[in-house]
Structures are given as structure tokens and as C-alpha cells.
Image: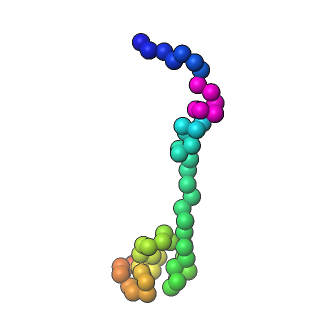
Amino acid sequence: MALPKKKTSKARRDKRRSHDKLISLSLSLCPQCHEPKLPHRVCPHCGQYKGKEIVEVEEV
């Protein structure tokens, strides 16, 4: 079985893991209801996109 010749340093190990971080969502406000929503998507609260009603939302 193959074994490493040298110990992998902490810097080299952490460089490899640099892409494993968590990213925060970028949220924008809906111009109609002012609720946070994902950009370029229909608002889940009011169902509008670019000023037009796309999805009919049931009120609870």
C-alpha cells in the first residue's frame, strides 16, 4: 500500500479545502411587497415578477 513520504503541511491542506466554505445567499427586496427574495425569481410571497403576476398565491 502506498504511503506519503512527507507530512502534508497545514497550509497545503487548508489550501485544498479553500472551496469548501459556506456562502451566504444574496437576497433582494421585492418591489411590490418588500419581502426578501432570491434575485431573478418569482416572489414567493406575492407571486409577481417584473411587475406582472406570474403565480397565484393562496393567502393563509
Per the picture, the main secondary structure of the magenta-coloured stretch is helix
Farthest residue, direction top = 1
Nearest to the observer: residue 60 or residue 39? 39
**Residue sitting at 38 percent across and 85 percent down?**
53
Spot occupied by residue 20 in the image (x, y as percentages of width and height) = 53, 44
Name the quadrant of the N terminus: top left
Looking at the rendering, which quadrant does residue 58 occupy?
bottom left
**Residue sitting at 54 percent across and 37 percent down?**
16
In the rendered structure, does residue 54 fall within the stretch colored magenta?
Answer: no
Q: Which residues are magenta?
A: 8-13
Q: Does 30 appear above or below 5?
A: below
**Residue sitting at 35 percent across and 81 percent down?**
54
Name the quadrant of the C terminus: bottom left
Q: Does 39 appear above or below 8?
A: below
Nearest to the observer: residue 47 or residue 58? 47
Spot occupied by residue 18 in the image (x, y as percentages of width and height) = 57, 43
Residue 10 visible (yes or no): yes
Spot occupied by residue 2 in the image (x, y as percentages of width and height) = 44, 15
